[in-house]
Amino acid sequence: MNKIYYDNSKGSIKEKFSKINGVLNGEYIEYNTNGIFNIKKYKDGAIPLTEEEILIKNREEEMNKNIKVEISKLIIIDDLISEISGIFLLVQMENSKINYYTKLIEKKFNKQFDEEYIKFYLYTKRNYFIKI
């Protein structure tokens, strides 16, 4: 058990911990000058996650993966609309023209993207550029 004290080893205990092969293992206890302490448990140098933390981490990773997929879809739509008409024409498009381009994009990608998804994105993008 390693111990570190305040005031160059003349004061009260500051930290108490164990290391195996130079890596924290077991309880790491941190004391403040009032004697209040904080305990962390280490295994092979890291604080192991609880089951709940593992579930949360897995959910976040899955969400990030889904976000990346959706962003890549939007990039494809952006590239295609730029190739077809350019952003300045998108700003000037009437709703009927956006509906027309929506169907073109949907056909080009063999219905890989839902028509409503494409339409929503194009309307949103047009309105965004109109407002700025």
Image: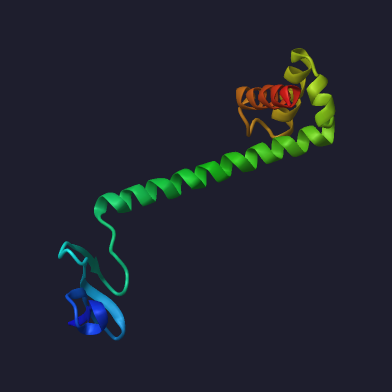
Up/down of 99 relative to 65, above or below:
above
* Left or right relative to 83: residue 22: left
* Left or right relative to 132: residue 46: left
Count the marks: 0
Q: How is the image coloured?
A: rainbow
Residue under the image location 28 percent in, 76 percent down:
24
| Depth order, front residue of 127/106 | 127
Q: Position of residue 52 (x, y in %)?
A: 27, 49
Quadrant of residue 41 within the rendered picture: bottom left
Q: Position of residue 35 (x, y in %)?
A: 15, 65
Residue under the image location 29 percent in, 65 percent down:
47
| Depth order, front residue of 41/100 | 41
* Left or right relative to 22: residue 41: left
For the N terminus, give its image quadrant.
bottom left
Q: Position of residue 55 (x, y in %)?
A: 32, 49
* Left or right relative to 59: residue 88: right
Quadrant of residue 39 within the rendered picture: bottom left
Up/down of 31 relative to 2, above or below:
above
Residue under the image location 76 percent in, 13 percent down:
96
For the C terminus, give its image quadrant.
top right
- Which residue reaches farthest bottom? 21
Up/down of 128 relative to 83, above or below:
above
Residue under the image location 73 percent in, 18 percent down:
99
Quadrant of residue 36 within the rendered picture: bottom left
Q: Position of residue 129 (x, y in %)?
A: 74, 26
